[in-house]
């Protein structure tokens, strides 16, 4: 009997939102529900994607143009989709991804100021209408996130941005969530861990009850 297509779930949020902890929690919940799960991340997830990630996150004396940054994000994504995400979904494995295209709208769009329409062109080109089935947006005040992130290792190229940049990124994420409330679920990540996990469990359990949508081309 053919297996159901897997579901594509993404986790988003500004730095210090607790993505790694939440990803592990969601993965365990899916596995407990009997799902096969592949966890991965963007930018990255493939050998070439990880090399692009190093270029994107590393500090460069000469800087990096906004368009270059955008194109490299989508180059890594094209590779990730072809090599890893689509094959896994096709085999009925759920894919749980730390960031995806909502991050591009939030960081390169709201943060850097690249027009939404230009990002949409890249999205249509690379994804051909494919989008996550569910996105968990871990939302918390920028100050709280940066304070948490600051306790970790040396800041990468994005983590070195200003509070103003992250305010714009957070706002960008909230606007995406408001525009697509069925797909993007806002999680209050400012709460203690138990409170965050309670919200995640509720959203995941609801999601698992919904009919499998699998790969959803939006183009006619
Ligand atoms: P992280 O996944 O370890 O948080 O780091 C990835 C960084 O890359 C993070 O600062 C957000 C940034 N990013 C973008 O700017 N655009 C994107 O499309 C993606 C996937 C990530």
Image: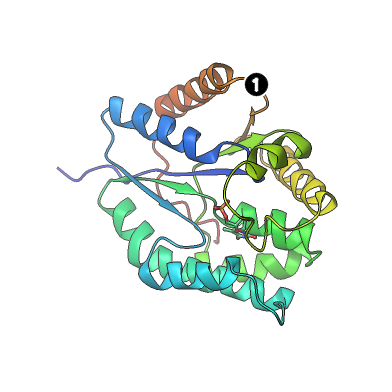
Image quadrant occupied by the N terminus: top left
| Above-or-below relation of 157 to 37 | below
Residue 44 in view in this figure: yes
* Residue at disc 1, secondary structure: loop
**Residue 147 coordinates in the image, percent (x, y):** 71, 38
Q: Nearer the viewer, residue 210 or 59?
A: 59
Image quadrant occupied by the C terminus: bottom right
**Residue 120 coordinates in the image, percent (x, y):** 67, 65
Residue drawn at (71%, 45%) of the image: 173
Residue drawn at (38%, 57%) of the image: 85
| Above-or-below relation of 191 to 14 | above
Residue drawn at (57%, 74%) of the image: 72
Q: Is residue 219 left or right of residue 114?
A: left
Q: Is residue 85 left or right of residue 117?
A: left
Q: Quadrant of ligand 1?
A: bottom right
Figure quadrant of residue 12:
top right
Residue reaching furthest to the left: 1
How many numbered discs, if any? 1
Q: Which of 87 and 13 is in front in this view?
A: 13
Residue 125 in view in this figure: no
Q: Say few, some or many: other residues with alpha carbon within 10 Å of mark 1 (under 14 / 14 to 19 / 20 or more).
A: few
Q: Is residue 115 left or right of residue 100?
A: right
Q: Which of 50 and 36 is in front in this view?
A: 50
Residue designated by label 1: 191
**Residue 86 coordinates in the image, percent (x, y):** 36, 59
Q: Is residue 160 left or right of residue 22?
A: right
Q: Is mark 1 within 8 Å of ligand 1?
A: no
**Residue 219 coordinates in the image, percent (x, y):** 55, 61
Figure quadrant of residue 152:
top right
Residue reaching furthest to the bottom: 62
């Amino acid at each position: 009997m053919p297996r159901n297509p897997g579901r594509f779930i993404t986790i988003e949020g500004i730095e210090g939102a607790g993505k790694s902890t939440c990803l592990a929690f969601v993965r365990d919940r899916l596995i407990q529900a009997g799902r096969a799960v592949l966890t991965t991340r963007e930018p990255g997830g493939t050998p070439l994607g990880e090399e692009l990630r190093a270029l994107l996150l590393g500090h460069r004396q000469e800087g990096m143009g906004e368009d270059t940054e955008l194109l490299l994000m989508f180059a890594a994504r094209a590779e990730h989709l072809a090599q890893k995400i689509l094959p896994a979904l096709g085999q009925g494995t759920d894919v749980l991804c730390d960031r995806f295209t909502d991050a591009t709208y939030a960081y390169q769009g709201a943060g850097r100021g690249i027009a939404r329409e230009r990002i949409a062109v890249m999205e249509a080109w690379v994804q051909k209408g494919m989008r996550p089935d569910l996105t968990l947006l871990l939302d918390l005040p920028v100050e709280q996130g940066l304070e948490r992130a600051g306790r970790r290792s040396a800041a990468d190229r994005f983590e070195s941005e200003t509070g103003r940049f992250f305010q714009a990124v957070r706002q960008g994420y909230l606007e995406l969530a408001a525009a697509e409330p069925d797909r993007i679920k806002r999680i209050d990540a400012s709460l203690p861990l138990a409170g965050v996990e309670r919200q995640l469990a509720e959203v995941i359990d609801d999601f698992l009850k919904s009919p499998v949508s699998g790969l959803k081309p939006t183009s006619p």
